[in-house]
Amino acid sequence: MKNMKRIKCIIAYDGTNFLGYQIQNQGRTVQGELEKVLKRMHKGERIRVYASGRTDTHVHALGQVIHFDSPLDLRVENWQKALNAQLPADISIVDVQFVPDTFHARYSSIGKEYHYRVLLKKERDPFLRNYSYHFPYELNMKAMREGMNYFLGTHNFTSFSSAKSTVENRVRTIERFEVIEKADELVFQIRGNGFLYNMVRIIVGTVLEVGIGKRAPSEIPTILDKKDRKFAGKTVPGCGLYLYQVFYKEDIQNF
Amino acid sequence: MKNMKRIKCIIAYDGTNFLGYQIQNQGRTVQGELEKVLKRMHKGERIRVYASGRTDTHVHALGQVIHFDSPLDLRVENWQKALNAQLPADISIVDVQFVPDTFHARYSSIGKEYHYRVLLKKERDPFLRNYSYHFPYELNMKAMREGMNYFLGTHNFTSFSSAKSTVENRVRTIERFEVIEKADELVFQIRGNGFLYNMVRIIVGTVLEVGIGKRAPSEIPTILDKKDRKFAGKTVPGCGLYLYQVFYKEDIQNF
């Protein structure tokens, strides 16, 4: 058996034209495109790609992490060049590293950061239609920040995960949750040890409902206690969501 | 006959999914989408839309100007709302004004400004693939600016227009031509009294060839003198080009 190397890549993609990250029988996926290129580079052999987690339809990534094993003898710069030369223009390899066999993009991950962009200006912007959720309403920033603080720490997030989710353990820890005010946009930045299905989108949807005065900030702990999806707010669209960074033990100094 | 009003709109569009501005037998166009909405608003009657000029496949607009005549009795705010509510998300009505019958989006125009975005960073950016031309080469900014200065003033631009163009008078005046340096991008800004087919894209392509040292800045006047397309540089892709503003007499204070 050949000497296999484990390769870790940080990748970015524009989710607009993907049915999400994970390979499916039909439709264009990020994993599908990656494996297609790797298969070509390995003379028809399937090289399985593992990611830190899936992203949904239209969700973007600035710092998704994947790994795969290969017998090819290429230097990191050449892996990056070869992959970028063959991948479609909406996926880009940002960084390549050789890692020990014990590294796993999903199981070694100790946390993630997501960003969610909200476009506040009155008229929609044709250039941001796929990149920022248009929500042109007056928002009470103080109330939103008050509501956001209730998410910090360790909670059972059942109320803030898709009713379709089948994961047993719904307890997660949020380390940071902030909102940055830009000229016409808000950027929610949320960092935690893990996220359930639709969790960021339901949290942001609920916080926006606090912002427009539909809910009081103090309702958040009550919703958490209910452990039932139907008490939380709407799931905001995938197009505003960015997987910003995945954290691993070796990055702990940045965490 | 009903009392007709002439309506001037400033519109923005993301050119990515359009086969250009002008209506065609097949394919999606900006004019086609505008006229489809106006027809619906006028009970099936065709309302013809006139623009300041065409834009090509994938070319964007931040300040394209159109006009049309309508018997409908709507206030400007309601024109904007009604059109934006029905137009697809990649076209947006930025401003609406009632204008005298003597106004014509094309014939009243006294000048235009185009911007051209060039992405310089080494790796391509999946989020800018449709919005900025990736040209990751070392550029001599001083030589480029020297070359750019030769375009200022009044010249016959035959060498810098598509060989397919059938316009007789190829004399145009360039009032301003600058390049702004951003973090990873250059933005060329060019303003003139009119532009021939592909003129901005051939000028920018030629200036980039000066930037990489393929041509000397002093070749520009020679190329202008030749009055032959084959002496100028490559036509850069449409995706980097933005129709930024159209000028009319009443805007002369901004010109």
Image (tube, coloured by chain):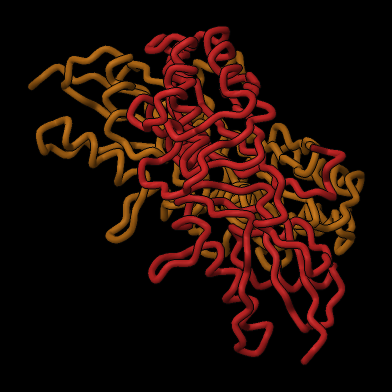
Chain colours: A orange, B red
Residue A177 at x, y = what percent? Answer: 74, 37
B44 to A207, vertically: above or below? below
Res. A133 in view: no
The foreground one among B6 and B85 is: B6
Q: Quadrant of the C terminus of chain A?
A: top right
Numbered disc total? 0
The part of the image, by quadrant, that contains residue B2 is bottom right
| Residue B201 vs residue A47, the one in the foreground | B201
Left/right placement of residue B226 relative to residue A63 reads left
A216 to the left or right of B23: right
Q: Nearer the viewer, residue B247 or A43?
A: B247
Give the residue displayed 57% in from the left and 7% down from the top. Answer: B142
Is A82 on the left-hand or right-hand side of A169?
Answer: left
Residue B236: name its quadrant: top left
Instruction: Work out which residue is located at the far bottom of the displayed protein and give it.
Output: B1
Q: Is residue A122 visible to us here?
A: yes
Quadrant in which the N terminus of chain A appears: top left
Which x, y percent locates residue B26?
38, 69
Q: Residue at x 50, y 33 (%)?
A: B157
Estimate the x, y position of residue A198 in percent, counting from the top left.
58, 54
Q: Nearer the viewer, residue A102 or B105?
A: B105
| Residue in the image at 34% along x and 37% along y | A50
User: Residue B176: x, y in percent?
Assistant: 68, 27
Q: Outermost residue, left direction? A: A1
